Amino acid sequence: MMTRTCLLVLIAAVSLQAQVTFDRVLGADREPQNWLSYSGTLFNQRFSPLTQITPANAKNLQLQWVWQTRSLEKFEATALVVDGVLYTVQAPNDVVALDAVTGRVFWTYSHQPAPDARTCCGRVNRGLAILGDTLYMGTIDAHLLAIDARSGSLIWDTAVASSAQRYSITHSPLVVKDKVIVGTAGGDMGIRGIVAAFDAKTGKEVWRFHTIPGPGEPGNDSWSGNSWMTGGAGVWNAGAYDPETNLTFWGTGNPAPDWDGRNRLGDNLYSDSVVALDADTGKLKWHYQFTPHDELDYDSTQVPVLADITFRGQPRKVMLWANRNGLMYVLDRKTGEFLLGKPYVKVNWMDGFDHKGRPKRVPGKIPTPEGTLIQPHVHGATNWAPPSFSPKTGWFYVAHWENSGTIVTEGLSPRPVGVNTRQTTMGQVNLQQFYNNDEEAYGVVRAYDPSTLEPKWEYRMNDITWGGVLTTASDVLFSGGKEGYFFALDARTGELLWKASVGGQVNAGPMSYSVGGRQYVTIAAGSALFAYALPQAQ
Amino acid sequence: MQSSSAVFVLVAAGLLAGGGALSAQHATAFDIEDGGRAFRNTCANCHGPDGDQVAGIDLGRGRFRRTLTDQELVSIIRNGIPNTPMPANNVSEAQAAKIVAYLRSLAESRRSVAAAGNATRGKSIFDGKGACATCHRVNGNGSRLGPDLSRIGQVRRTIELEQSLIEPAAEVLPANRSYRVTTREGATVTGRLLNHDTFTVQLLDSKEQLRSFLKADLMDFGFAPTPMPSYKGTLDAQETADVVSYLVSLKGSTNP
């Protein structure tokens, strides 16, 4: 009886939902019970200050509830939790509000995407943003929706770009002050990438930045002919925000056509880059291009991770980036200065950097009639899954692929390029998985010291991984992989603490929240969302 | 498969027997309800909930650009009309027949008897004398206690809106039902029922909070009467018509 009463008090206590002001979003680490943006905070550290689950007790974690989607699409969303209510997305674009304690549904808002909506790689969605009482979702038909967080009603619906021209939105929007910022995917289908900001109250557009400069703008001459018009550079993963500089950071995708650069000579700015945009105006403050003139499909759409670290003996405000191209970077986030870059897997397309951090290309590492081994694999050393930075350990944690490569054989002549054309040339090259010394590629979670980019420990999986990483203030790390396990590691040693078979591929990042003093950790796997917690005291 | 064919045979039999009215008679109430749901999902976006949103066509009154049999309507629903905005729809013949049965039933049902309304006056009454925003929300303004009305003109028929004002308890949609729980401590919470199952119940309470309860921890729980008052004695016929006109004008907000 006592237990029931206590539980009731706990459940009743969760229901004091207050307005999520931007100050709350910005200071999300001050309210560890909630998870207010895609990676927890606008620094994208995916670090939970909660400490109830520890390396000592993680072995006791128990399943609390499972919520099954009615979708066969990959479940890539990270949920938000606001004062006991969990919000997530059922792919492609249904917003769902759940009781974070029981997993039971409060409401569902269903968006019916336009019939002409097309995505290159799955009708997926990676999550929501919240401001005030309003949730924001980008859709695969390139709309931005505002939805009432209490009732699930649509407030406004703005077309960001044309789905008929193959624009789509798959990532979680970014709330900055009174604006909602999103980017558009579709880089393999002849789009010209966009990052745009909208008034959070009205949905009216405030500014728009093209990830490929137009005629007369700096960088337009990095595209031969008219290739800039359909050059891709899509944006399909979450951005970051630094209030000190008022800069918002976005990773951009590959130039198109992806495996054939002959029609787009030049560096192809700002593809495969990080762009730093003024949050009020959308003006470009700096950029850094990870893979100039990419012909290997190395999208740089990883989540920018912002951290304050000691670098070469000095405190430094940096951006950490484990890129699809196999290189890990430390950039100065105020200026974009290249501080450090290193391969973190086998890389054979470059062999060092110049003094400005431009990679030195190895000639011939492009498709040939005989076939060329390219490392890392076409899917990259890591792809889009969100990493973690723990201010507690000071380490950067990345789940990625080891020992991967692709043998690329030149195929037919390139397809015509243009708006509304699926112009990826993947179909024109033969991509074969590469097995090194009869040993297949495998997945790892590794801890890196960001001041040196040297690994501190490694946890190895049999199969590769598309899972993200969460760390907590009690030094527990959560991640998962393609094999369908969700597991906890000791963030200081990499030792396996606990595992659960979730019966489906983990294609998302874990997150943590608490209700009534009880810590939960969730993971999306297969078509379901799983919530775990320690047993309640009897 | 058998039962869908049977439904279609019934509807088609009605057609052969001499027209729309008979086909509607032969369709069951369930078929008509099903057809109504399909109409709102498939057709109402362009034709409106009353079926009168496209110029020259009033589906709810059986008024088309030319006389059409049920079978012709079924064909149009499924195949569209070339060179017009009317698209082909991916619905089975049986489903299309149910939509036709629903449309025929509309033509026979009671229409609003109220005077022609004025939406601008209706908005003033909504915001003022009617105090509707005390419970309802339109385009982000007002309370969430009752149903959000921002798109109500897109999903509810005129006659239904009128009835909700005059006789609100006559029909309450499942999504709008009121529910009351009493905790073991004696606290009572009333709200709009969002979801419930054998073990739990989820409400949007009167303070606009999302609440979830374990039934095992409740002293009492169950449906409550709708808090929506009747405006029968509060608004006259013209004022009621004005408010209905305003509600019909609410189609949601889309930024192009």
Image (spheres, coloured by chain):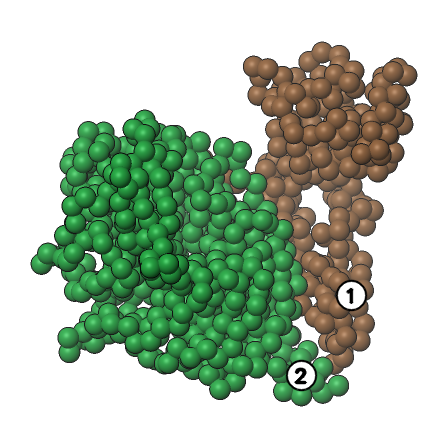
Chain of the residue that carries numbered disc 2 in the rendered image: A
**Left or right, B81 with reference to B158:** left
Q: Tell me what residue is drawn at x 15 percent, y 36 percent.
A: A221
| Closer to us: A91 or A32 | A91
Q: How crowded is mark 1: few (under 14 residues within 10 Å), some or many (20 or more)?
A: few
SS label for mark 2: helix
What label does residue A523 carry, if any?
none
- In the rendered view, would you say A208 is above or below A341? above
Q: Tell me what residue is drawn at x 71 percent, y 35 percent.
A: B38
Residue lying at the far left in this picture: please name it: A355
| Closer to us: B224 or A356 | A356
Q: How far apart are marks 1 and 2 (CA)?
A: 21 Å
Name the colour assigned to chain B in the rendering: brown
In the figure, the green chain has which letter? A
Identify residue for label 2.
A6
Chain of the residue that carries numbered disc 1 in the rendered image: B
Amino acid beneath label 2: Cys
Question: Could you say where residue B192 lies in the image, as x and y percent from the top left?
Answer: 70, 58
Question: Could you say where residue A112 lies in the image, as x and y percent from the top left?
Answer: 57, 41
Between disc 1 and disc 2, the foreground one is: 1
Q: Tell me what residue is drawn at x 78 percent, y 65 percent.
A: B198
Amino acid beneath label 1: Thr
Q: Tell me what residue is drawn at x 65 percent, y 17 percent.
A: B56
Residue B241 visible in this rendered orientation of the protein: no
Residues behind callouts 1 and 2 on a single chain: no
**Residue A192 falls in image quadrant:** top left
> Which quarter shows the N terminus of chain B?
top right
Identify residue for label 1.
B198
